[in-house]
Amino acid sequence: MSLSLVTLFLLSIMVFLGGQVLPGNVGRAILGPFADQRAVDALNHTLGVDRPLLTQYATWIWKFVRGDMGTSYIFRSPVAPFVIDALGNSMKLAAVAFVLVVPIGILGGVVAALNLNRPLDRIISLGGLSVTVLPEFVTGIILILIFGVWLRWLPISAAWPKDAGFFTQLYYLILPSLPLFLVLFGYIARMARSGMIEALDSDYTRTAVLKGLPWRTVIWRHVLRNALLPTITVIATQTGYLIGGLVVIETLFRYQGIGSLIFTAARGKDFPMLESGILTIGIVYAVATLIADFLYSVLNPRIRLGSDQ
Amino acid sequence: MSKNYRILDLIRRNRSPLENHLIDGLVDGRVSRRDFIRHGSLLGLSLPLLGGITTAAGLSGMPSLARAQNAPGATIRVGSSVPAATIDPVTIADAGGLVVMQQVAEFLCVDGPDLVLKPALAESWKPNDKGTVWTFKLRKGVKFHSGGEMKADDVVASIDRLADPANSSNALSVFTGILQKGATKKVDDYTVEFHLDAANGNFPYMVSSDNYNAVIIPASYKGDYEKSFDGTGPFKIEKYTPKVGASFVRNEDYWGEKALPERTEFTFFADMQPQILALQGGQIDIINQMPVLAGVALLNDPSFEIISLKSSAHQQLHMHCDEGPTKDARVRRAIALCLDREKLAAGLMKGRSALGNDSPFAAVYPSTDTTIPQRKQDIAQAKQLMEAAGVGQGFKMTLTTERYLEIPEYAQLIQNWVKEIGIELELNILDQGAYYGDAVFGKSNWLDSAMGITDYGHRGVPNVYLAAPLKSDGTWNAAHFKNKDYDALATSYIAALDLEAQKADAGKIQKLLLEETPVIFGYFYDYLTATAKGVTGVQPTAMSQLFLEKASKA
């Protein structure tokens, strides 16, 4: 926990310093290259970005630790609603993608491992790998053309109408979650497959089979439980990507996620928005890792018992 | 048609010497009908009067703007780019923001797609003899959405706010050297005078839609425009969500003809591709602005209409005139002679551009001297110039530019063309932020690079292009071009009130710039708007504004 806090603190410093290295300044980014220098100076002064760097950083971090994310330089309004909305949207999209890809990916891996080197295994492994290497903006455009433009079954934009209910939101999220499914399916299926193969080949599985347990019980209680361990790690490491790394998907599907929020903030040198967005993702990532560690210990008695000692 | 001198004499009686000189130019055939209408509108002559004069001069009257009987009540859905910052008339600087603001707020006059100024909140305007004071008569009975009547105090406050260096005004670069804070004066409730720093023959453009910050909002405005979106326009704000979209409803109290659409909806897109897909998928009716390369898929698709406006937007290829091999004007001319402009216009720009002749005088401007010969590709002459300049064996240099629109492809074409005269260009293509940097000399790749390409948006008059990038003390003079003759000519052009005097100066400037070639103007690209079939009455401007009051859907 304390390690996570140190990490987040270091992250905040890195983001701040990184933002200073980028060329240009906030006033210039807002007013554009052709604005008069006096106007740019006046705007920088109004925004307080002409103060010493340390003062700017200290002011912001002091507010942040007290729960105030500050005011956006670009939008001139509080950062928190932007970040909270965007995080909520990103989590909804990530959740839909997870719900689709995790069971199907694991199932694919399990089926492939149980049919090792047979045609089904080849189809799942090669097919999964092929779609994983396709960038999501390519699969995204193809899916939009098929389902949005030609068939017109699904909305092209993921931004649902205001006051939309759960199922309407879900309907709008299907299309943008499909490219994510394609990116992650091959990855998760391969991890599940190799975990299964290893578990199937292990001594405890042989023992379980030899002691006469039914095949279904062997798979459920012994093989799958062990095979899933590396898969959980993979899923946890993908959380950061799914929450904050979807700039391309968010742009393509016009979705207000936190990835594009950060991207816009970085381009506009909107430091309070950038810091708050990145730290929020950092916090989500830290929490996801914590949950993964917990699940890992639940599934793996060796860790649980080891820590007890 | 024969000339009706009786009517012409009647009209002449009440006109100023300047206006009569323009009328003489039309009657004697020195000024074309098109140029007469454009320049007449600039001098504040009303469009019906201009129509009357052209008829009396034996020419056909005003082009009859066929007003289609469009059906009212539609909801028009527009795709546009995401406003890059908070929408504030003072600071706004991007296309996504200004099109939203322009739906609710209006200008004193509007620079139409034909570059003819049309009255809006001002009914008429005229200069004094020297062009140093311009008087604008305001329309009566115009109401802000918040209820009050628009009067001279609001105009003075709106323009003064923009001319004040303490206000972070994006329009300061337009007004510097022209109009200072305090120089906009109320004469009475419906008359305003602008007292200029120096004579300016094109001043009405500076307070027209051409200066997109110059909307008239209440004098009481204190900031936070997104809370009120107050204005006098044909639409009123319904809802604005930053980064997402905006919707507007018809203003039933509008001073002019009521808008046809009942509602308009603007959806913001961070990229072009999703906008095109949304138009193809029927989720929007209009793409406000579509760059030619990004929109290739729609250009020849019969399911969509492309509104193509001739504009003065262009890419400036600057070359340092004070150092390196391009210090010699012969080398700069040699490079300019390598460009195959016909191919550029037809290939890279898909026929949606006009040829550039290495000066800001685009064909769309009435003052452009069209008798100046067009520069064409001539490799043999380019090689001779290189030899004469002592660099016949060629040299290496870097072309620095921004990753924006078709510029990277343009840079590659130039790289290939100049190879023929032995110049090896290394391309350094940067993100826009890195290219412009702090946008001041010494801290900007744009202003400091020995050779670079920079995008310049459309302007209804060439004043800005003539001053900042080319004058010796110009703040955007990336070519480091210093030429006293040029400075004098540019100053003279800007001050000239008379079209023929402007044309004379323009011709001299065009010749001088062809000789010196500090900047290559290869082409002027068209402004494209895409609409779904059946959507009519849409009127974009090359400044990214979109007038929807006459729009309807089949």
Image: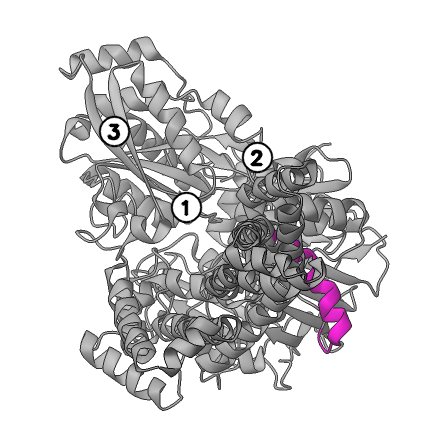
Q: Residue at x 43, y 20 (%)?
A: B340
Residue A209 location (% of width, % of height): 63, 57
> Mainly helix, strand or loop, the magenta region?
helix
- The amino acid sitting under disc 1 is Tyr
Check residue B275 in the rendering and tell me which mark sits there, or answer none. none
Q: Chain of mark 3?
A: B
- Read off the residue under disc 2: B32
Q: Chain of mark 2?
A: B
- Read off the residue under disc 3: B516
Q: Viewer-proximal residue, B532 or A36?
A: B532
Left or right, residue A37 beside residue B175: left
Distance from Cα at disc 3 to Cα at disc 1: 20 Å
- Read off the residue under disc 1: B456
Does label 3 or label 1 sit earlier along the sequence?
Answer: 1
Q: Are marks 3 and 2 in contact (CB under 8 Å)?
A: no
Q: Is residue A166 magenta?
A: yes
Q: Quadrant of the N terminus of chain A?
A: bottom left
Q: Viewer-proximal residue, A37 or A178?
A: A178
Q: Is residue A40 above or below residue B509?
A: below
Which portion, as a residue range, is magenta? A162-179
Q: Is residue B499 magenta?
A: no
In this view of the protein, can residue B14 be seen by the observer? no
Q: What is the crowding at mark 2: few (fewer than 14 residues within 10 Å), some, or many (at least 20)?
A: some
Residue B193 location (% of width, % of height): 44, 70
- Secondary structure beneath disc 2? loop
